[in-house]
Amino acid sequence: AKDKEKSNIQVFHVAMETYSIQRLKLENELRHAISNQEFILHYQPQVDIHTGQIIGMEALVRWMHPTKGMIPPKEFIPLAEETGFIVQLGDWVLYEACRQNKAWQDQGLLHVPVSVNLSMRQFSEHGIKNKISEVLVDTGLPPKYLEIEITESMTMDVKHASDWLNKLKKLGVQVAIDDFGTGYSSLSYIKQFPIDKLKIDRSFVNDMLLDPNNATIVSTIIAMTRQLNLKVIAEGVETKEQLQFLQEKQCDEVQGFLFSPPVPSDTMGSLLEQAVQ
Ligand code: C2E
Ligand code: CA
Ligand code: CA
Ligand code: CA
């Protein structure tokens, strides 16, 4: 038994070592990925629930790793958050999304806002307002064509969050609360913030036709946004049945695989081109 214990410990050490070496390696690769131009943005259309018209798009980052291929954000965003690298990466995403949207507009394609995910680190960073306004000036994108997505947890510090959000609103950019329903915000809480839109988290949409509790949550969020004069979008819509339920509940907008997965920029460009024809 003693021997077995000992060898287990050794296995554990080896596993730990491999894990931290891999992590260090990834961390190091991550740092160079921007200058190596290994990040790209995919875009997922957001559509009007009644007409099916594209009314926006979300920018979602992808890492094209030279040997591992495409790495999804869930495998590097957490590490980027921990190490603080997310600030640099987030700056790149913000710039690239605005630059690309302006380029599409200059080509005469459909003019719709692009949504960019902001991490807590960027949000609380001193000077985020100046950074955003600089990006808008540099790219020439009119502010109303940029939407910032923040998560509910980022509004926990009510005083600071209101300050930041007020500044962003003054710039003329739109603000959406992402993954809504997964945090702690209540109706009265959300009312204090100058926001434009709530995004109902995918997990509720996913189960709403199977689980009556989720159906109630979804219809309550929709009803609540109407009361507050906010727009509401459901994410993760995969089936016609889900779409129909959301239409009945009078949700405004939808995003999900039923319409389109996130696509590379040239595909998104074609979608925007078709939309104006
Ligand atoms: P999110 O902001 O909630 O983004 C939506 C995610 O849902 C995307 O995953 C998208 O591909 C996925 N999705 C969309 N429609 C459907 C559907 O119908 N069914 C299912 N099952 N999934 C759907 P993705 O691209 O893997 O991104 C995951 C998360 O990574 C994002 O979740 C966001 O939190 C984070 N992320 C992505 N890009 C960025 C970024 O540029 N900055 C920051 N800070 N976070 C990012
Ligand atoms: Ca998002
Ligand atoms: Ca989301
Ligand atoms: Ca999410």
Image (cartoon, rainbow, N blue to C red):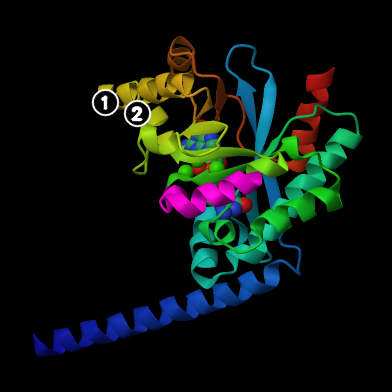
Residue 102 in view, yes or no: yes
Q: Is residue 226 left or right of residue 15?
A: right
Q: Earlier in the sequence, mark 2 or mark 1?
A: 2
Numbered label attached to residue 28? none
| Image vertical order of residue 259 relative to residue 182, above or below | above
* Spot occupied by residue 249 in the image (x, y as percentages of width and height): 43, 13
Relative to 24, does residue 154 appear above or below in the rendering?
above
Task: Please identify the residue farthest to the left as the structure is shown.
Answer: 1
Name the residue: 29% across, 80% down. Answer: 12
Q: Which residue is mark 2?
A: 207
Residue 72 in view, yes or no: no
Q: Main secondary structure of the magenta part?
A: helix
Q: What is the quadrant of the N terminus in the image?
A: bottom left
Locate the C terminus and report the quarter of the image it occupies.
top right
Give the number of the disc on residue 213. 1
Element assignment for label 2: helix
Q: Amino acid at mark 1?
A: Asn
Highlighted magenta segment, given as a residue range? 153-168
Q: Nearer the viewer, residue 64 or 2?
A: 64
Whole-angstrom CA distance, mark 2 to mark 1, is 9 Å
- Residue 29 % position (x, y): 63, 73
Tell me which residue sits at (35%, 24%) in the image. Answer: 208
Q: Residue furthest right?
A: 107
